[in-house]
Image: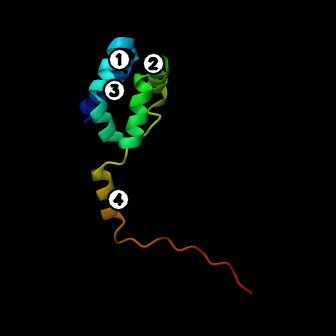
């Protein structure tokens, strides 16, 4: 598992660095447009793509994201939604103390 996490983090940094190169970055970004839109959703993915394709803005955004992480988060995966639904299906909400009414 450590190898896959390390590989994914390394690939993410490489993708961000490639996107920062003006001409190569634009081609690279357009090539991954479908993947980004599928991963983030239609509107957030389109905004993410628009920022990445814009020359100076995209470069600045990608350099900052190397250190801070994605500004536009991915939509929740179906797997995590299924785990949340199955984990909380039988649980009751925590009870809160009632205020003393006099």
Residue drawn 49% across and 29% down? 68
CA neighbours of label 4 inside 10 A, class few (<14), some (14 to 19), many (20+): few
Q: Mark 2 near mark 1, Cβ–Cβ under 8 Å?
A: yes
Q: Which mark is residue 59?
A: 2
Identify the image quadrant of residue 51: top left
Q: Mark 4 near mark 1, Cβ–Cβ under 8 Å?
A: no
Residue drawn 33% across and 38% down? 37
Per the model, the C-alpha gap separating discs 4 and 2 is 36 Å
Residue drawn 49% across and 21% down? 57
The disc, 4 or 2, on the residue closer to the chain's N-terminal end is: 2
Residue 74 makes an appearance in the image: no
Q: Position of residue 17 (x, y in %)?
A: 37, 17
CA neighbours of label 2 inside 10 A, class few (<14), some (14 to 19), many (20+): many
**Which residue is disc 3 drawn over?**
12
**Which residue is disc 4 drawn over?**
84
The disc, 4 or 3, on the residue closer to the chain's N-terminal end is: 3
Per the model, the C-alpha gap separating discs 2 and 3 is 15 Å
**Which residue is disc 1 drawn over?**
25
């Amino acid at each position: 598992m450590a190898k896959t996490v390390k590989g994914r983090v390394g690939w993410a940094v490489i993708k961000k660095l490639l996107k920062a190169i003006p001409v190569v970055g634009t081609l690279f970004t357009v090539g991954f447009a479908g993947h980004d839109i599928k991963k983030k959703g239609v509107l957030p993915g389109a905004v993410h793509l628009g920022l990445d394709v814009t020359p100076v803005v995209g470069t600045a955004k990608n350099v900052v994201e190397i250190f801070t992480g994605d500004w536009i988060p991915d939509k929740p995966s179906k797997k995590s939604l299924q785990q949340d639904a199955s984990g909380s299906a039988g649980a009751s909400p925590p009870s809160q103390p009632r205020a003393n009414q006099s």
